[in-house]
Image (tube, rainbow, N blue to C red):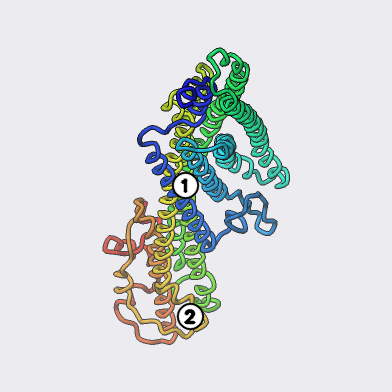
Amino acid sequence: MALSSATNPFDQALVAVNANVFWTAPPGFSKRQVVLITLQALTILADVFYLGLLHYTQRSSEDGNAGPGMWWVARWVNRSTGRIMVVNQRTMSTVLSALAQGVWMGHVIDHLLLYTGGDIHTLDRAIVWRAITIVFMLGWFWVLTWGNVTSFVLATHRKIPSRVVNTLVLAAGLAPLIVVIVLLVFMIVRGMQFRDVYVAFAKGLRSNAAAYPNVTLAAYAEIQPQAAALVKAANTYYHTFCMMATNAVAYTALSAIINFGGLLLARKIKHQIKFNEKLITSGSRAVTQQGTLIVAGHGNVGEPQAGDPISRMQGGGVMAGANVLLAQRQEQRIILGLKRARRDVLTMFAFVLCFSLIVSGALLFVTIVSGTSDPMSISWAKSEMLFTGPAWAIMVVMLAAQLGLIWNALTFRRKERGTAQMFEEGSTGPVASWIRSKGNRKKIIRRSTPETLVASPVISGSLPRSETGQQRACVEVEDRRRCAEEIMVNLVRIRDEDEEGKPRSPALMKWEGLTPRDSMDDCEKGGQRGGLETPASRR
């Protein structure tokens, strides 16, 4: 019986069919799949950490550029402020990345079970996972490209109604996904057809082998039509996969071309950063000049002046310094946000480009193999490349891109804290203290002589252009303003002494008859020793 079973054509056919459907895994296959699953789990953890980082940054941020929260995915215009709340593309891509890794983990696990002794139920799950994996890859990739390009292009036109913008963006994102979902269903149907033909053929072989144990080789001709049907179903299924891979190659190539708009966006952001930095520098110089001209705007020494000069400083000049400090802080935060956005755009551009090249190469290999070879004769190495190669490529690129985004977010957070700490330290100076105590007008002012006024310690020279100098620009401006205010207060004190008929010192006599602007010219002569800088000194 054993001999007849070994030579039974039905048993031989069943062994051959099972060997083609349930392959025996080569050495090291299980270890490679475990490494792949581990890296995919690390990518999911990186996605979760990045989502938490986005949530923390969004809650601690002072402005709402990303809408009401981290989950905001639509575009709308705030009527009260006129600001545009943009699509939160970082959250969308990160959530889809985590979902994609979960799908590919299921794909890898089922193929691991399928090729290490799986059954018909494992084959059913593998067919579904195989279709979902390639479709989810394309869907996620398109949403990533859609979020990386259209959210910046369409959501930045303020005059277009938000309803129109959201409709166009949604249509641009959903239309390709609908096509991909149709292909997914089509591929699953073809896979299930192959599965049904295989189950029927295997069942018939087992029945014939049990019913005809001593059948001759001539009976093998009776199963040829069923074998041909099985081969046809397998070819149809794999050719469907080939067609889908061909569409995927064109899909990724088109997305890569569209994604080159990210370079234009990064260039535009770079120009905006340079413009804002120049704006800060020129604004700081203008405020410095305004601080030096406070003294020249109050008439000659000895002339009666309307109102209290200290009140005017508290209500005007000093408060202007506080407003400038706040404006410069906001401008620094905007620059940091623009730099982070530029790094994120470049990171995502590099990611999509690598994704397109690697996945297109893998899918092109799949297309060539599936279109030119017999599916039943594909080697194990080609099959492993066919079903797990894109997952490896995607996982490596996605993990690298996610780590890059996390690094950008941490760098932005660290620089933002440094900027906030710098402005807090600058706000503890004498001008800010005066602002906080502006209700007290009986402030005691130290009496100074003109000699001490000339030698007042002021930071001289133009503002530095290095990054460290830009960070100290606001503190330098406030020191200049403080010196100008001290000069004006002391000049007022000198005027009061003159009106009261008090004796004047010889040092005061040389100031008599001079205008404040002339006295500032005297200060300019001493500017080389630390005096004030005025427009005349720069000439």
Q: Position of residue 367 (x, y in %)?
A: 52, 22
Q: Earlier in the sequence, mark 1 or mark 2?
A: 1
Q: What amino acid is labelled 2 in the image? A: Ser
Local secondary structure at mark 2: loop
Task: Using the numbered discs, state the Cα–Cα distance from disc 1 to disc 2 in whole angstroms.
Answer: 36 Å
Residue at 57% from the left image edge and 56% from the top image edge:
70
Q: What amino acid is labelled 1 in the image? A: Ile
Residue most extreme to the left: 529
Asked whether residue 142 appears in the rendered view, the answer is no
Q: Position of residue 411 (x, y in %)?
A: 40, 54
Residue denoted by label 2: 437
Tell me if residue 503 comes above or below residue 470 in the rendering.
below
Residue denoted by label 1: 273
Tell me if residue 329 comes above or below residue 194 in the rendering.
below
Contact check, label 1 and label 2, Cβ < 8 Å:
no
Residue at 41% from the left image edge and 27% from the top image edge:
381
Residue most extreme to the front: 1
